[in-house]
């Protein structure tokens, strides 16, 4: 049908080329950048429409747009276009992880042992139960079961942060959701580094990979993240506080860290998270303490979640894989809810349960971690981590709504907020 529509235009164009030699040949396909930009606009409109008419979180709409137009459905976003857009997705996820790292309040944890107990219970119970489910019920090897647990044990920092910003929520439940998400992310990154060595030990012919790769990842992320934080604080200290110049310096240093991390094959999400932690810990003069990223990072979030939605392997979905992924999510939800209910403290039980509900999202970080590990041994990694990818795919759609529900039930959302970039 499209060919019949384009045929007259093609013939006219070819006749013009005979006289106008500066004209390019008639394009056989739409430029990938132009098509991707168009799809981002469509993703934005879907997210805004769902938010306005169904009160769905906008993130869900962005993911749906990516899934619909990606290789698993209509195929309008090709594998090549996804690869070209990966640096933008890394930058978007990196800036969001920077914010999560900056919000990691270690002093609050030290002064609140009950809160620390709940966080440690969430981390350990989630990892243990997910590992047991993947190993005994699904039948994965110990290394890949550990990889599945490391990828899916924590909440999704990007989804939690954007949902909270969209809801304009403030209060105890909101702060504890952020804190549990940040600590859980840090723990999952530690588990991720260890699992790299475990996977190498099981599959690599050279034992040096099992030792040096985790060290390279951790040392590289610490070095690049620390350098980025030092450079940002050093330059920003000479500028007026809360000025646009400081915002520019913070973003520029973050993007520099993203670029160096990509060059060194160090995970961007880990590097920028550590950069945020260093910024929060080393900013004694509060140079950048109150310097926030501009609203424009929502635009990067659209890119991130459209790409993540397009990257999900729905074409490999089977009913068995779906049931196994659902089982993993139920086990994960039970672990988080039980850990926070058991932790006790001055906060009422129903609010602790709301925190447990708010940290259920599983999204971009899990997908990027899964592909990072699977890329080491593509012949087995993709199938071995299909469980975690399908679990992330399901929570891409459900997670933002669950987090939004927890914030709403806590009564901490701003009345009549619209959130996002609208």
Image (cartoon, rainbow, N blue to C red):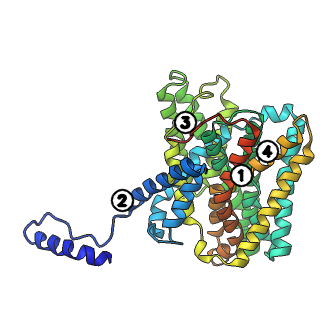
The local secondary structure at tag 4 comes to: helix
Q: CA distance from mark 3 to mark 1?
A: 25 Å
Residue closest to the eye, 409 or 65: 409
Q: Earlier in the sequence, mark 4 or mark 3?
A: 3
First along the sequence among labels 1 and 4: 4
User: Which residue is labeled 4 in the image?
Assistant: 355
Viewer-side label of 2, 4: 4
Residue 293's mark? 3
**For residue 81, side relative to residue 123 (left or right):** left
Q: Is residue 294 above or below residue 388?
A: above
Residue 415 occupies quadrant: top right
Please rate how many residues cluster around mark 1, counting C-alpha atoms within 10 Å: few if below 14, some from 14 to 19, many from 20: many
Q: Looking at the image, which residue sits at the far left?
A: 19
Mark pair 4, 3: CA separation: 25 Å
Q: Residue 238 vs residue 330: left or right?
A: left
The CA span between labels 2 and 4 is: 41 Å
* Nearer mark to the viewer, of 3 and 1: 1
- Disc marking residue 34: 2
Mark 1 and mark 2 lie on one chain; the one further toward the N terminus is: 2
What residue is rendered at 90% in x and 34% in y? 346
Element under disc 1? helix
Give whichever of 334, 233 is nearer the camera: 334
Residue at the image point whose x is 65% and y is 73% from the top:
382
Earlier sequence position, callout 2 versus callout 4? 2
Circle nearer the viewer, 1 or 4: 1
Q: Which residue is mark 1?
A: 402
């Amino acid at each position: 049908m499209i060919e019949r529509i384009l045929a007259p235009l093609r013939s006219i164009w070819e006749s013009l080329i005979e006289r106008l030699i500066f004209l390019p040949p008639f394009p056989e396909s739409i430029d990938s950048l132009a098509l991707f930009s168009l799809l981002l606009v469509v993703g934005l409109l879907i997210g805004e429409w769902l938010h306005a008419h169904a009160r769905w979180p906008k993130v869900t709409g962005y993911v749906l747009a990516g899934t619909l137009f990606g290789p698993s459905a209509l195929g309008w976003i090709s594998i090549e276009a996804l690869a070209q857009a990966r640096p933008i997705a890394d930058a978007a996820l990196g800036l969001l992880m920077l914010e999560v790292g900056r919000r990691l309040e270690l002093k609050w944890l030290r002064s609140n042992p009950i809160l620390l107990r709940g966080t440690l219970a969430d981390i350990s119970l989630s990892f243990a139960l997910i590992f047991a489910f993947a190993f005994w019920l699904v039948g994965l090897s110990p290394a890949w079961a550990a990889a599945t647990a490391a990828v899916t044990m924590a909440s999704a920092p990007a989804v939690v942060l954007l949902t909270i910003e969209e809801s304009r929520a403030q209060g105890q439940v909101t702060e504890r959701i952020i804190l549990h998400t940040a600590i859980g992310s840090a723990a999952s990154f530690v588990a991720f580094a260890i699992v790299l060595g475990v996977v190498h030990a099981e599959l690599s012919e050279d034992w040096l990979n099992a030792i040096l790769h985790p060290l390279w990842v951790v040392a590289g992320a610490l070095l690049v993240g620390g350098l980025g934080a030092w450079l940002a604080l050093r330059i920003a200290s000479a500028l007026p506080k809360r000025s646009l110049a400081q915002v520019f310096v913070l973003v520029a240093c973050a993007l520099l860290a993203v670029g160096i991390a990509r060059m060194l094959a160090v995970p961007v999400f880990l590097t920028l998270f550590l950069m945020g932690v260093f910024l929060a810990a080393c900013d004694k003069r509060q140079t950048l303490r109150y310097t926030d990223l501009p609203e424009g990072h929502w635009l990067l979030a659209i890119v991130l979640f459209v790409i993540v939605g397009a990257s999900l392997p729905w074409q490999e979905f089977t009913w068995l894989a779906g049931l196994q992924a659902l089982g993993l999510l139920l086990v994960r939800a039970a672990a988080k809810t039980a850990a926070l209910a058991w932790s006790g403290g001055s906060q009422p039980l129903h609010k602790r349960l709301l925190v447990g509900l708010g940290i259920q999202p599983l999204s971009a970080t899990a997908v990027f971690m899964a592909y990072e590990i699977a890329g080491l041994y593509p012949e087995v990694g993709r199938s071995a981590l299909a469980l975690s990818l399908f679990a992330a795919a399901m929570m891409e759609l459900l997670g933002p709504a669950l987090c939004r529900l927890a914030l709403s039930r806590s009564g901490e959302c701003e009345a009549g907020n619209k959130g996002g970039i609208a």
